[in-house]
Amino acid sequence: MRVGNDFVVIENVRAGVCVECGEKYYPPGVVDRFRNIEKSIMDRKKLKRLEVIGAMYRPKYDAYL
């Protein structure tokens, strides 16, 4: 998942993929968890006084999914 210039590695997420257009479909609640992860990263970035060029995060598996 990309958040601004940052990337978040989220592992072991089930998703369906449309064979015609490639769109991904997630089980109920997964997108809400993605948004919570995105929000926590954006809140943390507000506190930094340095310009963030990019970072990579990997949330603990049991923390969000």
Image (cartoon, grey):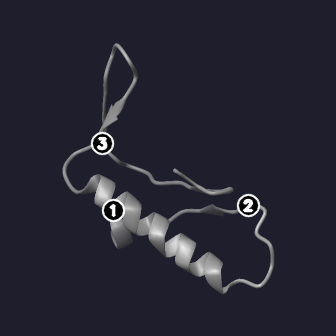
Q: Is residue 14 left or right of residue 35?
A: left
Residue 29 position in % (x across, y down): 22, 57
49 lies above or below 8:
below
1 or 3: tag closer to the N-terminus: 3
Q: Amino acid at mark 1?
A: Arg
At x 63%, y 57%, the residue is 4
Distance in Å between CA atoms under marks 2 and 1 = 22 Å
Residue 24 position in % (x across, y down): 35, 33
Question: From this viewpoint, is residue 3 visible?
Answer: yes
- Residue 25 image-quadrant placement: top left
Which residue is the extreme one toward the front? 46
- Residue 62 image-quadrant placement: bottom left
Q: Amino acid at mark 2?
A: Gly
Q: Is residue 23 left or right of residue 41?
A: left
Tell me, for residue 14, which label it has, or none.
3
Q: Which residue is mark 1?
A: 33
Residue 21 position in % (x across, y down): 38, 18
Distance in Å between CA atoms under marks 3 and 2 = 27 Å
Q: Quadrant of the C terminus?
A: bottom left
Question: From this viewpoint, is residue 60 visible?
Answer: no
- Of badges 1 and 3, nearer the viewer stands 1
At x 51%, y 50%, the residue is 1
Q: Are marks 3 and 2 in contact (CB under 8 Å)?
A: no
Q: Secondary structure at mark 1?
A: helix
Q: Are marks 1 and 3 in contact (CB under 8 Å)?
A: no
Q: Which residue is mark 2?
A: 54
Q: Amino acid at mark 3?
A: Arg
Distance in Å between CA atoms under marks 1 and 3 = 13 Å
Residue 14 position in % (x across, y down): 30, 42
